[in-house]
Image (cartoon, grey):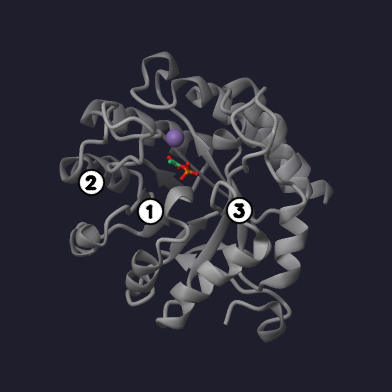
Amino acid sequence: IVARALHPAGSVVKVRGVPIGGEQIQVIAGPCSVETQAQMDEAAAGVAAAGCRLMRGGAFKPRTSPYAFQGLGVIGLEYFQRAAQRYKLPVVTELMDVRMLDTFMEYDVDVIQIGARNMQNFDLLKEVGRVNKPVILKRGLSATLSEWLMAAEYIAAGGNHSIIFCERGIRTFETAYRNVLDITAIPALKRETHLPVIVDPSHAAGKAWMVPALAQAAIAAGADGLLIEMHPNPCEAWCDADQALAPDELQALMRTLAAVAAAV
Ligand code: PEP
Ligand code: MN
């Protein structure tokens, strides 16, 4: 279902009227995790001011340590929606557990994010395949392109064809940065699928200073958009503080991206 041959010109996934794929580059920005109403209000203002048309934020966080902050849970969805609605920003948030799917529908989450760690959680994929909501499918930490494509087929087979692939860096022997952004995957995947491919430079870099270079490289390589972590006060972020851009850094990056997109 996701094979390029079925739609050689490529397909566009629409999120409340915002097209992902096609001519425009879309940038989804926001904090790693939802913390407080004030933090989300400030973040939403920063996302809108930078000209991004969708907002991210996790209420349920897949943390390496069970003792680390796990996300606010349902109240986080409430803070997120309240902040995003003021700026008419569609919300993108991670679903980790099938049992929360009805709650996500109730809170009218606009895009369901499937995280890298759940790329091959087949029961979760089957369930999001049955709902009428766009899904961002992140690449697993060590998933091959064919495994990633098959994971998307699990979603598509249930009837939900609104799938957006997201490259977020893979595990290699290198330890100097969080993950290796697989730029090669962008043209390679786009040749295999008609669906949009976006890139998350934040989780690849793990450091904010590296994010602009990776973001620009991704757009130059043909990515349809980006998923970027931005926090109103990066030093105080409860999760992934090192990789969060400040609102003014996001604004500056957005200006350079327009130039890169125009050049390719
Ligand atoms: C995230 O986007 O906050 C996240 C946890 O990403 P990943 O699943 O790519 O690690
Ligand atoms: Mn994060």
Neighbor class of circle 2 (other Cα within 10 Å; few <14, some 14-19, many 20+) is many
The answer to whether residue 161 shows anywhere in this view is no
Q: Is residue 237 above or below residue 6?
A: above
Mark nearer the N terminus (3 vs 2) = 2
Where's ligand 2: which quadrant?
top left
Neighbor class of circle 1 (other Cα within 10 Å; few <14, some 14-19, many 20+) is many
Q: Mark 3 sits on what residue? A: 198
Q: Looking at the image, is mark 1 or mark 3 nearer the viewer?
A: 3
- Which x, y percent locates residue 149? 60, 68
Question: As shown in the figure, which amino acid type bears the numbered disc 1?
Answer: Pro
Dot 3 lies on which element? strand
- Which of the two residues, 107 or 261, is positioned nearer the viewer here? 107
In the figure, is residue 246 to the left or right of 232?
Answer: right
Question: As shown in the figure, which amino acid type bears the numbered disc 2?
Answer: Leu
Residue 90: assigned label? 1
Q: Mark 2 sits on what residue? A: 77
Real-space Cα separation, disc 2 to disc 1, in angstroms: 12 Å
- Which x, y percent locates residue 202? 56, 34
- Which of the two residues, 124 or 54, is positioned nearer the viewer here? 124
Question: As shown in the figure, which amino acid type bears the numbered disc 3?
Answer: Ile
Q: Are marks 2 and 1 in contact (CB under 8 Å)?
A: no
